[in-house]
Image (spheres, rainbow, N blue to C red):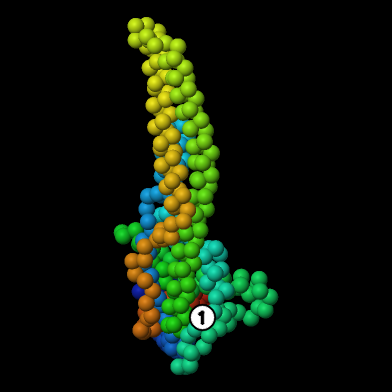
C-alpha cells in the first residue's frame, strides 16, 4: 500500500467510500439518538420582555452642575450606570435575583393549579435556607437571559421554564425586583446628594451674608466712592462677590429642592416597551437542526477515524 504521506484527495475519498457503512451509519444512529432524546425532554416555555433604560443621569445632573462651579467634576453615570449594558449585567446579580428566588409561584401541572416556592419548581433539594436560596439563584441564572439590542438600545429579557405560567410569574417578579432596585438606588443617591447640598447651602448662604455685610460696611464708610477710582474698583469687587454668591446660592437651593423631590419620586428608571405576556405555545424543539448538526459532526469524526485506521494499516504493512 502507498505511503499515507503521498495520499491524494481521491485516495481519502476512496477510503471513506469503502467504509461507507461506518461513515453513514454512525451519523444516522447518533442523529436518531439525539432526535429521540430531544423528543423525550420536557417542552420549554419562554416569556420575553423589552426594556428601555432612561438616559441622562438626571439625578446627578444638579449636583454635577453645582460642583462644576467649584472646579469639581462629578460623574453623572448617564453613560454607564443607566446604559443597556449595565442592566444586562444587573439582571444577573444576586441583588435582583434573590427577591425572585425566595418567592412562591402558581402554575398548572397536568391541568391542576399548584402553588409552591421556586425552590420546589426548580427541584432544589437543600433544606438549609442559605444553601437553598443560593442554589435557586444559580439555577435561575440559567433560565433568565438578558441581552442588549444594539440597533435600538433596548434590553431583551427572556425567562424560560417548563411551565408557561411559571415563566410569566418569574418575569413579572423579576421586573418588580428591577423597579424596586431602581427606586431604592435613586432614593439612596438623592439622600446622599440632599445631605451634601444642605451642608453646601448653609456654607454658601453664610458666604453671601458675609459678602453683603462687607458691601453694607463699605457703602456706610464711602458714600462718595464714585469720585475715587480706587474706591470704584473696591466697590465693583464687592458687588461681584455678592452677585456671584447669590447666583451660586440660588443654584444650590434649586438643586436641593430637586433632590428632595427625587427622594420620594416613584417613577421607574426603566420603561417597559414590551411587558411579559403569558406564552401560548412552547419553544420550538429544532429537531432537524440539532440532530443534523450532531450527525454532521459524527460523520466528520467517523471519516477521520477511517483515515487514521487506513494509515495505521498502511504503515504496519510496510517492510
Identify which residue, 57 or 188, lies in the foreground. 188
Look at the image and tell me whether residue 135 can be seen: yes
**In which quarter of the view is residue 156 placed?**
bottom left
How many marks are shown on the rendered structure?
A: 1
Q: Quadrant of residue 148?
A: bottom left
**111 or 299: nearer the eye?**
111
Q: Residues within 10 Å of mark 1 (few under 14, many from 20)?
A: many
**At 37% from the left edge and 56% from the top edge, which residue is drawn?**
54
Q: Tell me if I can see residue 306 in this picture.
A: no
Tell me if residue 21 comes above or below residue 178 in the rendering. below
Res 36 → quadrant: bottom left
* Residue positioned 39% across, 83% down in the render: 282
Residue sticking out furthest to the left: 151
Identity of the residue drawn at 51% across and 58% down? 184
Say above or below: 308 vs 230.
below
Q: Residue furthest right?
A: 128
Quadrant where the C terminus sits is bottom right
- x%, y% of residue 256? 45, 44
**Residue identifier under label 1:** 105
Left or right of 118 on screen, residue 88: left
**Identity of the residue drawn at 41% across and 68% down:** 157
**Foreground: 65 or 118?**
65
Q: Position of residue 169 (x, y in %)?
A: 46, 77
Residue 52 on image: x %, y %: 36, 61
Query: Picture coordinates of residue 211 (x, y %)?
Result: 46, 24
Element on which disc 1 rests: strand
Q: State whether residue 198 is above or below residue 133.
A: above
Amino acid at each position: 500500500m502507498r505511503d499515507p504521506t503521498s495520499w491524494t484527495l481521491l485516495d481519502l475519498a476512496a477510503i471513506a467510500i469503502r467504509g461507507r457503512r461506518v461513515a453513514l451509519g454512525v451519523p444516522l444512529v447518533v442523529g436518531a439518538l439525539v432526535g429521540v432524546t430531544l423528543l423525550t425532554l420536557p417542552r420549554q416555555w419562554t416569556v420575553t420582555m423589552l426594556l428601555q433604560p432612561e438616559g441622562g443621569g438626571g439625578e446627578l445632573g444638579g449636583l454635577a452642575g453645582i460642583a462644576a462651579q467649584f472646579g469639581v467634576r462629578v460623574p453623572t453615570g448617564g453613560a454607564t450606570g443607566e446604559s443597556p449594558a449595565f442592566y444586562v449585567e444587573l439582571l444577573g446579580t444576586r441583588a435582583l435575583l434573590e427577591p425572585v428566588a425566595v418567592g412562591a409561584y402558581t402554575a398548572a401541572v397536568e391541568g391542576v393549579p399548584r402553588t409552591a416556592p421556586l425552590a420546589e419548581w426548580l427541584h432544589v433539594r437543600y433544606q438549609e435556607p442559605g444553601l437553598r436560596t443560593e442554589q435557586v439563584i444559580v439555577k435561575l441564572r440559567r433560565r433568565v437571559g438578558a441581552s442588549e439590542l444594539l440597533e435600538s438600545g433596548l434590553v431583551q429579557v427572556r425567562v424560560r421554564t417548563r411551565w408557561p405560567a411559571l415563566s410569566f410569574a418569574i418575569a413579572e417578579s423579576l421586573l418588580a425586583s428591577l423597579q424596586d432596585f431602581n427606586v431604592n438606588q435613586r432614593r439612596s443617591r438623592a439622600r446622599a446628594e440632599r445631605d451634601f447640598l444642605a451642608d453646601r447651602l448653609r456654607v454658601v448662604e453664610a458666604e453671601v451674608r458675609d459678602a453683603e455685610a462687607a458691601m453694607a460696611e463699605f457703602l456706610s464708610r464711602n458714600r462718595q466712592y464714585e469720585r475715587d477710582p480706587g474706591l470704584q474698583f473696591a466697590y465693583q469687587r464687592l458687588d461681584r462677590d455678592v452677585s456671584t454668591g447669590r447666583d451660586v446660592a440660588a443654584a444650590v437651593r434649586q438643586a436641593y429642592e430637586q433632590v428632595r423631590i427625587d427622594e420620594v419620586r416613584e417613577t421607574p428608571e426603566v420603561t417597559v416597551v414590551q411587558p411579559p405576556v403569558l406564552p401560548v405555545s412552547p419553544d420550538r424543539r429544532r429537531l432537524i437542526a440539532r440532530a443534523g448538526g450532531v450527525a454532521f459532526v459524527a460523520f466528520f469524526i467517523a471519516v477521520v477515524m477511517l483515515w487514521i485506521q487506513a494509515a495505521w494499516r498502511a504503515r504496519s504493512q510496510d517492510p
